[in-house]
Amino acid sequence: MKSIEVSEDVYDALKKMTTDFHQSPDDVLAALLNLRVSPATAKEPLVAHMLSAEFRAKFTDADKYLAILSWVATKHAADFNEFILSLASGRRYLGWSREEIVEQCRHNQARQIPGTHFWAIMNIDTATKRRFLARVLEFVGYSDEIIELVCGAIGMRGAIMRRGHAVEAVGPT
């Protein structure tokens, strides 16, 4: 094992990631550098998925957004379906068909969520995708820390609004 020197800020961010998400510093750095990672060491399955090579290969925020929705929809099928049913009238970001999304506005762009029969509206900005994803994850029952990490994976750096207050999130820009 080699030793390196890092700034206090880098050390604090690394320490937070290793403590909050039960990863070793080596696992966190390997994931950030797209090197081998042992996703099995993550105690939270969604974190393990996000550390996987498959997820890290996603290039665009849209692909990451769909990949996270896909994972949640397949691992929490009943809750995901209930979430869609609970959506109020008006603009719906998820639906059971492309037509359901497009009928709200003919300019909507929809993509099927991989591995599911669900569809997602895609012509929304990244901040809206993050806010909506936070709502889905909160509905399913994820902790604030996991929600922050997941939202950070789709380009977030800064605060998101949840439960009427700002929550600071970590992640790349």
Image (spheres, rainbow, N blue to C red):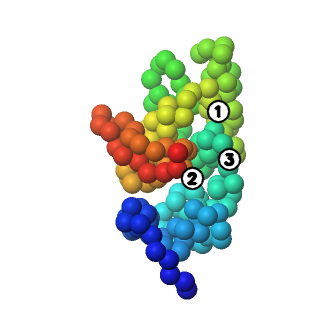
Q: Is residue 27 visible?
A: yes
Badge 1 amino acid: Trp
Residue in view at x 45 percent, y 41 percent: 134
Where is residue 84 drawn, in percent x and y?
52, 33
- Residue at the extreme bottom: 1
Find residue 86 and report its image quarter: top left
Residue in view at x 41 percent, y 42 percent: 158
Whichever of callouts 3 and 2 sits on the residue coming sooner in the sequence is 3
Q: Which residue is mark 2?
A: 75
Q: Which residue is mark 1?
A: 119
Q: Kindly report the distance in space between the C-alpha atoms of the residues bearing marks 1 and 2.
A: 17 Å
Secondary structure under tag 1 reads: strand
Secondary structure under tag 2 reads: helix
**Circles 1, 2 touching at the beta carbon (< 8 Å):** no
Q: Which residue is mark 3?
A: 59
Q: Residues within 10 Å of mark 3 (few under 14, many from 20)?
A: few
Q: Residues within 10 Å of mark 1 (few under 14, many from 20)?
A: many
Q: Residues within 10 Å of mark 2 (few under 14, many from 20)?
A: few
In this rendering, the answer to whether 119 lies above or below 26 is above
Where is residue 62 drawn, in percent x and y?
63, 38
Front residue of this view, candidates 55 and 33: 33
Front residue of this view, candidates 87 and 138: 138
Label 1 vs label 3, nearer the camera = 3
Residue in view at x 49 percent, y 17 percent: 90
Q: Kindly report the distance in space between the C-alpha atoms of the residues bearing marks 3 and 2.
A: 23 Å
